Amino acid sequence: MSHGSATVGFEDYCPVLETTLRLLPQGCSVTLLADRGFEHGALIRWLQEHQWSWAIRAKSDLKITRSNGKTSAVADLLPPEGEAYLFREVTVLQDIQCLRGCKRSQKFFHF
C-alpha cells in the first residue's frame, strides 16, 4: 500500500487486516506490532473484537487515564533512567483498556 504520510487512516488499511483475517488458520494467535502512526481507537477496537493481541508504540502526548482517575500524557509518566513503572488498569483513547492479562501465559501486553 503506497501512502504519502507517516500516519495512515484505519479505513485505508482495514481491508488488509480483513484479508489477513480470512487467510489465517482459524484459532491461531496473532499479535500486531505497530508504530505510533497506527495509534487509532478504531484499530484497537478491531483487534480486540477479533481477539488479536497488540503492542503499539505510543506518542509522548498520548493521554492515559490511570485507575485513580487521573489523566496524564505519557511523557509526564516516564520513569528516571534505569527504572521502570507499571501502571495497571490504564485506559487510553477514552475507553480502551491498554494493559491486559493473558491467562494462558500470565504475561501482560501493554500499549
Image (cartoon, rainbow, N blue to C red):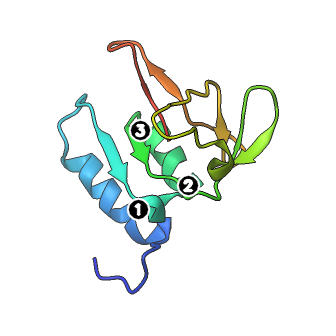
Quarter assignment of residue 90: top right
Q: Which mark is residue 78?
A: none
Give the residue at mark 3: 50
Residue 42, image x and y in percent?
55, 55
The amino acid beneath tag 3 is His
Find numbered disc 2 in the image and state the secondary structure of the residue it sits on. helix
Question: In the picture, residue 109 is in which quadrant?
Answer: top left
Q: Disc 1 on helix, strand or loop?
A: helix
Q: Is residue 22 left or right of residue 62?
A: left
* Label 3 to label 1: alpha-carbon separation: 13 Å
Name the one closer to the observer, 77 or 63: 77
Tell me how far mark 2 sits from mark 1, CA to CA.
9 Å
Residue 14: image tag: 1
Label 1 near label 2: C-beta < 8 Å? Answer: yes
Q: Residue furthest bottom?
A: 4
Rendered residue at 65%/59% (across/down): 61
Pinpoint residue 45: horizontal percent, then vertical percent: 54, 45
- Expressed as whole percent of the image width and height from the top left, the position of residue 57 reads 45, 52
Q: Is residue 24 left or right of residue 66?
A: left
